[in-house]
Amino acid sequence: MARAVHMDMAQSTTTAPDNRDLDPPQCSPILSDATTLVSSSEGRIDDAARISRYHMYHRKHGNTHYTLTPIILPQKENLFHPPKAFRKDRKTADDPSLAEDLHDQTFYVHKPTLIFHHPPRTLRRGSSKHASPVCLTRNSGFWRRWTLQFSSRLGDEGVLDPRGVVAREVDAGKAAGEGRLKGYGVRRWRILGESGKEHYNKARQCRKEEKKSKSNKKQRSHNMAPKDSVSEADQIIADQVVHLDWTSPFSRDTRRYHFRYADIEFYWKGTGTVRETKQLGYLCKFNHLKLVARVPVSSGRSDDEDKSDNEPGLDMRDLILGKYTSSIACRKSGILELYDGAILKFLEEYVPKESLEDWKHLDTDDELEAIRQTRLYEVIVATAICMIVGEWQKRQAVKKVIAAIVGEGAGGGGDAGG
């Protein structure tokens, strides 16, 4: 891809993202465009250089909920927690839910709390836990594998209850295999801090009313849900299951994740070739991961190709589709950049035609806008979020181990000196 002139809201100039160097585009200090346009030297818009930039923030102090939004939230860009008065002043003005025009380009990750259970996270297209669900994500022990379950019926009434978990009535059971959407019943008791307080109270009231009516004991259930739930005959399974694997945890390439979609191999992998132009940018050399698709080598080589990582002797090449840059801010995970033009080109050249029907029939003339509604785009965003959450949790685990070792060392030294 040729060097180009970048035009953003501040009208500052930078270079287009060369996929070999992956130079990060500059953005506005207050509001980042959901889509960045890069013009060529001839002055026309180059669709292949169009970028969607998302900022991932911790929604709450517990770091269980996340927001992926094109809006920059200044109060969450600080290295340390800002004063309370400043947070109150900026809360309303910077709430992504108030930006209606960017609502469809915002994603929300909700982690339900259910004692003695490990319910999956829910990725939603919107700015709150009430937005339309995209998929369920669940991780195995030590972040070795993330399972992503997609279903077009997740948004149906009664499938996900107000707690944010799958209702037990739609659970198809173990016979459904990996497509099973595991359901969770409403217990007779609730511990403080669990999700869905109002839902629990409603279920308890239903039980009281049933007890008063002296209904048949066989029709009673210890985990009865409110009456607006889906019937037991209406069980569902996932339309598609994608696995994101941490491929090499005990090697030099620890930042490497793999998933497969449409018979094509994708990798999120760390890169040290990014050049940061900001102050002390040389310290952030290894704060980046790139998304590549392993595709066959064509007769004409593309500028989007990552030539440095191609394995010798194989007729395959890496096509870069996105990049993630981690952040050290207290409430921000990092910045996710997706190269919409490269994704569109990838869809047209390498994905079977029958797989493109979900976006070619959308009511829009903008192809780059249409691809954001495709399953592939949702898979990319979901795998990125899983990778980001996993990377953050691993860093926190390492910090705790180091703190424990330092604490034990200091304690041992004090005892010896005494």
Image (tube, rainbow, N blue to C red):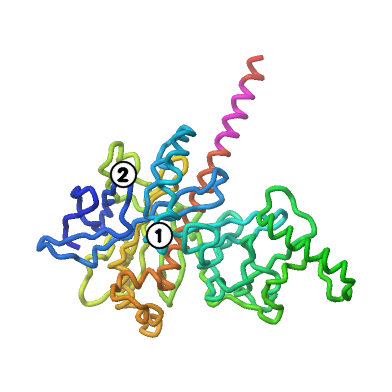
Q: Toward which corner of the image does residue 110 lie, by quadrant?
A: bottom right
2 left or right, relative to 296: left
304 left or right, relative to 193: left
- Circle 1 sits in a helix, a strand or a loop, which is it? helix
Q: Position of residue 219 (x, y in %)?
A: 84, 75
Amino acid of disc 1: Glu
Write the residue at 67% across / 68% down. Answer: 167
- Circle 2 sits in a helix, a strand or a loop, which is it? loop
Query: According to the image, label 2 marks what residue?
Result: 29
Instruction: Single out the residue that lies furthest toward the top.
Output: 418
Q: Which residues are magenta?
A: 402-413
69 over 340 or under it: above or below? above
Q: Position of residue 85 (x, y in %)?
A: 47, 33
On whether residue 79 falls in the magenta region, the answer is no
The answer to whether residue 209 shows anywhere in this view is: yes
- Mark-to-mark CA distance, 2 and 1: 20 Å
Amino acid of disc 2: Pro
On whether residue 407 falls in the magenta region, the answer is yes
221 left or right, relative to 195: right
388 over 91 or under it: above or below? below
- Please tell me which residue lies in front, 314 or 177: 177
Query: According to the image, label 1 marks what residue?
Result: 100
Closer to the chain start, of discs 2 and 1, is: 2
122 left or right, relative to 166: left
Mark 1 burial class by Cα count in 10 Å: few <14, some 14-19, many 20+: few
Give the main secondary structure of the magenta stretch: helix
